[in-house]
Amino acid sequence: MFTGIVQATCNVVAITKKNGLNTIEIAFPSHLIQGLVTGASVATNGVCLTVTKVADDRVFFDVMEETLNVTNLVNLSVDSPVNIERSLTFGSEIGGHILSGHVHTQALVTEVSHTEQHFNLTLEVAPKWMNYILYKGFVGVNGCSLTVGKVTEHSFKLHLIPETLALTNLSECKQGDRLNIEIDGQTQAIVDTVERVLAKRFALQSN
């Protein structure tokens, strides 16, 4: 489990493409490498990956074909910055919201508004996922726990503070980029339950 509070932006140093998977090598800072062992879970751009090897300051991950098909990890290249968060430990402070590291879909960046006063992103996702994206609700974006701004039928806005821009790769977003999206689990459960109840009630009234 993760909190959506990115701990560092780290660079990809090598990618080895194999049949059905990519092995990604990422350079970690010393404070994040400490205690990291093979088999540990690390959120990489919001995707829960398993550590396959630790060598000095380098951490290795195998990314399966299914993950490459669903997430933006398929677009990584050498020197690409990725958001990193190690898994939540017992007793840790939860500053964001609980994330599983299982990406639901990708969002298309349709607008970047960067002025001296603000840095806003407008993201578009498939209609089925917009049902779960609510004004002032939570959403995981490239592993960042963020509050949703204005919502339209097909898109939503994010208003990013300087701290988020400094610690994550969202500051490098440009129009046309794709970002990993994880829907808040509680929101999804509530929306799905309400829809089922209303559908059942409508069916009974129709009979």
Image (cartoon, rainbow, N blue to C red):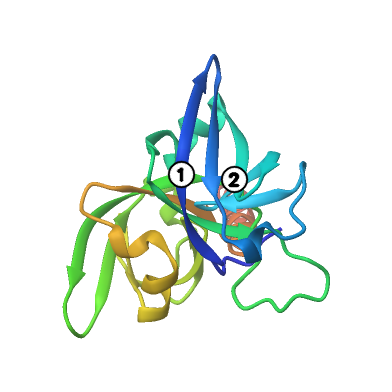
Task: Give the x, y percent position of residue 3.
Answer: 63, 67
**Does residue 196 sit above or below 61 in this rendering?**
below
The quarter of the image holding the N terminus is bottom right
The answer to which image quadrant residue 20 occupies is: top right
From this view, report whether residue 69 is shown above or below residue 96: above
Name the residue tied to disc 1.
12
Position of residue 112 relative to residue 28, above or below, is below
**Amino acid type for the residue under numbered disc 2:** Arg
State which mark lies toward you, 2 or 1: 2
Residue drawn at the location 52% of the way across and 58% of the way down: 143
Kindly identify which residue carries mark 2.
Answer: 58
Q: From the viewer's perspective, is 173 left or right of 139? A: left
Residue at 20%, 60% (x, y): give it: 111
Return the residue found at the far top.
Answer: 19
Circle 2 — which element? strand
Q: Which of the two residues, 118 or 199, is positioned nearer the viewer here?
A: 118
